[in-house]
Image (tube, rainbow, N blue to C red):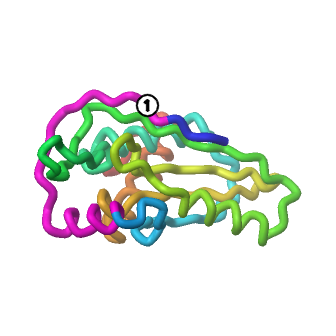
């Protein structure tokens, strides 16, 4: 499944922090490098509601400006971080019934390590593989320019809370 970048409206533009500048520079040297990808994959034993899962992910993106960021070079050559007012993320879905564990692992790694387009975004992606009844794989991948491991844990927690609330119609515990 291919992922489509959506047009995003600009909300604000900021200078890069020293750490972001270093990560951005390294990415310019090797744009295809996955060295700065942060990702987590899990096996789920309950059939996810893909529509609610995608909606919950987009709620997380709406809550955190960094997840709506892109990184561009201004005409003067300086890199800047652009925060977009809205940047929808599509949840990829693949039917992987009958796949062996090696094939699944290769697919997850290929998706996790696929290059991000820093200028167009989004710099976050998620994917679900349907493996069979009561067995699904879920991947969340982001570029290190917009996250770190602590933030990955927070984002994963919020996504789970918003998803649970979306399935039950309750208020999320955030």
Q: Is residue 80 left or right of residue 151?
A: left
Packing grade of label 1 (10 A; few <14, some 14-19, many >=20) is: some
Whether 50 is drawn above or below 160: the answer is above
In the rendered image, which residue does mark 1 sit on?
A: 6
Q: Mark 1 falls on what kind of element?
A: loop
Left or right for 127, reference 82: right
Q: Is residue 30 left or right of residue 41?
A: left
The reply to whether residue 135 is in sight is yes
Which image quarter holds the N terminus?
top right
Point out residue 62 in the picture as x, y percentages from the top left corner: 31, 39
**Residue drawn at the location 69% of the way across and 48% of the way down:** 47
- Indicate whether 79 appears above or below 166: below
Q: Residue at x 19, y 52 (%)?
A: 79
Residue 167 in sight from this viewpoint: no
Q: Position of residue 74 (x, y in %)?
A: 17, 43
Residue in front for this viewpoint, 70 or 33: 33
114 lies left or right of 62: right
Decide: is 112 above or below 61: below
Residue ID at (57%, 65%)? 41
Q: How many labels sit on residues?
A: 1
Q: Nearer the viewer, residue 96 or 42?
A: 96
Q: Which residues are magenta?
A: 5-28
Q: Is residue 63 magenta?
A: no
């Amino acid at each position: 499944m291919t992922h489509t970048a959506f047009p995003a409206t600009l909300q604000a533009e900021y200078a890069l922090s020293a750490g972001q500048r270093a990560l951005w520079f390294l990415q310019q040297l090797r744009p295809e490098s996955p060295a700065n990808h942060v990702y987590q994959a899990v096996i789920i034993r309950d059939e996810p509601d893909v529509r609610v899962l995608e909606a919950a992910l987009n709620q997380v993106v709406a809550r955190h400006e960094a997840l709506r960021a892109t990184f561009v070079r201004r005409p003067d050559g300086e890199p800047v971080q652009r925060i977009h007012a809205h940047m929808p993320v599509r949840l990829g879905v693949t039917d992987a019934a009958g796949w062996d564990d090696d094939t699944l692992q290769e697919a997850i790694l290929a998706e996790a390590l696929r290059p991000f387009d820093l200028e167009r975004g989004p710099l976050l992606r998620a994917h679900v593989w349907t493996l069979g009844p009561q067995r699904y794989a879920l991947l969340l991948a982001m570029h290190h320019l917009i996250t770190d491991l602590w933030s990955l844990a927070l984002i994963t927690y919020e996504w789970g809370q918003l998803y649970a609330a979306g399935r039950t119609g309750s208020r999320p515990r955030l």
